Image: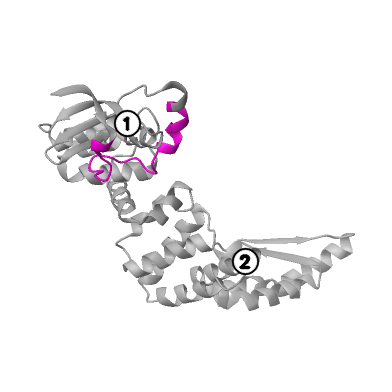
């Protein structure tokens, strides 16, 4: 049962956000609109024994409070509606605008324990998210993060995909990696690669050494220098065999470059492909290069066998 009436703003409990999921608060966006055209849609309140609480329209209520309204026209629901229904009423009232990922996480966390197995994929679809376990895990993790991290997600400084690793690491190590990605200004793809590598290193007991080395990079003040050092550290742990062979590669390249022959390997020796380039001024020059390659070509491929 619902009724429509003027409500003193002081009678509305602004602290209880049981059914709300707006993030950040939207009152600042609405003040100018209400100043110009007034309150077009009344907030929906729930009449509970302890007082009136907001089901939807928190931004409107706070904007009107800031504009020093004494009374507010509201729709009042009696305290007979099931919680799950109230959560979805609150959600539906906000779907006129795109919800951000943090808002979806807040809503889903509130309603998750009330959903049947069949209702979960329907709810994810309503939130415009893929109906699989990764979506559930990501939403539940986001809700556990503090406001600083939530704001970084909204500002696209944290790749939501890496949140699937929450629980795979010790919590302390997870947040170390997360903070390193933020402080090193890693892109979304670099953050994903960071967590993938860290997960692999954990299985061979090299994660602690990796984290220690990356943490030292934060002392570098120059951004470009820090990014370069990060890339080198990442590759050293990602391709440990390549780091060991780097000196040998330089020797081989120098040997052939002295004869005017450029030798290029696939980055980090991921494949046994080699590109050889040289310029010649005539047949005699060409035969000289070919003879050198015939006599020393084995050196080029020896790096794959060492």
Tell me, what colour scheme is on the image? one colour
Q: Please give the label number shown on residue 70.
A: 1
Q: Image quadrant for the N terminus?
A: top left
Front one among 288 and 221 = 221
Q: Is residue 117 visible?
A: no
Q: CA distance from mark 1 to mark 2?
A: 59 Å
Find residue 69 and report its horizontal and vertical position in percent: 35, 31
Q: Which residues are magenta?
A: 10-34
Judge whether residue 221 is colored magenta: no
> In the shown orientation, is residue 173 left or right of residue 123?
right
Seen at 48% across and 48% down, the residue is 155
Find residue 53 and report its horizontal and vertical position in percent: 22, 38
Residue at numbered disc 2: 228
From what the image shows, is residue 143 above or below residue 32? below
Front one among 135 and 80 = 80
Seen at 12% across and 34% down, the residue is 82
């Amino acid at each position: 049962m619902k009724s429509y009436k003027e409500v003193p703003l002081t009678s509305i409990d602004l602290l209880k956000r049981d059914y709300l999921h707006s993030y950040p608060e939207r009152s600042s966006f609405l003040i100018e609109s209400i100043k110009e055209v007034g309150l077009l849609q009344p907030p929906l309140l729930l009449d509970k024994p302890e007082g009136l609480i907001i089901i939807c329209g928190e931004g409107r209520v706070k904007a009107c409070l800031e504009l020093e309204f004494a009374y507010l026209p509201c729709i009042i629901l009696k305290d007979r509606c099931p919680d799950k229904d109230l959560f979805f009423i609150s959600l539906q009232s906000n779907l006129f605008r795109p919800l951000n990922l943090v808002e979806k996480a807040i809503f889903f966390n509130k309603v998750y324990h009330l959903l049947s197995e069949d209702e979960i994929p329907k709810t994810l679809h309503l939130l415009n998210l893929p109906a699989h376990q990764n979506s559930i895990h990501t939403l539940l993790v986001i809700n556990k993060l503090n406001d600083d991290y939530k704001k970084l997600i909204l500002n696209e400084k944290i790749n939501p995909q890496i949140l699937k690793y929450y629980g795979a690491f010790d919590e302390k190590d997870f947040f170390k990696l997360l903070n390193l990605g933020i402080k090193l200004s890693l892109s979304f793809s670099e953050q994903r690669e960071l967590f993938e590598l860290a997960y692999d290193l954990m299985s061979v007991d090299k994660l602690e050494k990796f984290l220690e080395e990356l943490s030292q990079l934060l002392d570098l003040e120059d951004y470009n220098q820090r990014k370069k050092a990060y890339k080198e550290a990442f590759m050293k742990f990602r391709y440990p065999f390549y780091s060991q062979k780097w000196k040998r590669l330089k020797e081989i390249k120098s040997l052939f470059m002295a004869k005017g022959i450029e030798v290029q390997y696939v980055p980090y020796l991921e494949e046994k492909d080699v590109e050889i380039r040289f310029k010649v001024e005539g047949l005699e020059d060409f035969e000289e290069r070919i003879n050198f390659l015939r006599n020393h070509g084995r050196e080029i491929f020896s790096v794959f066998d060492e």
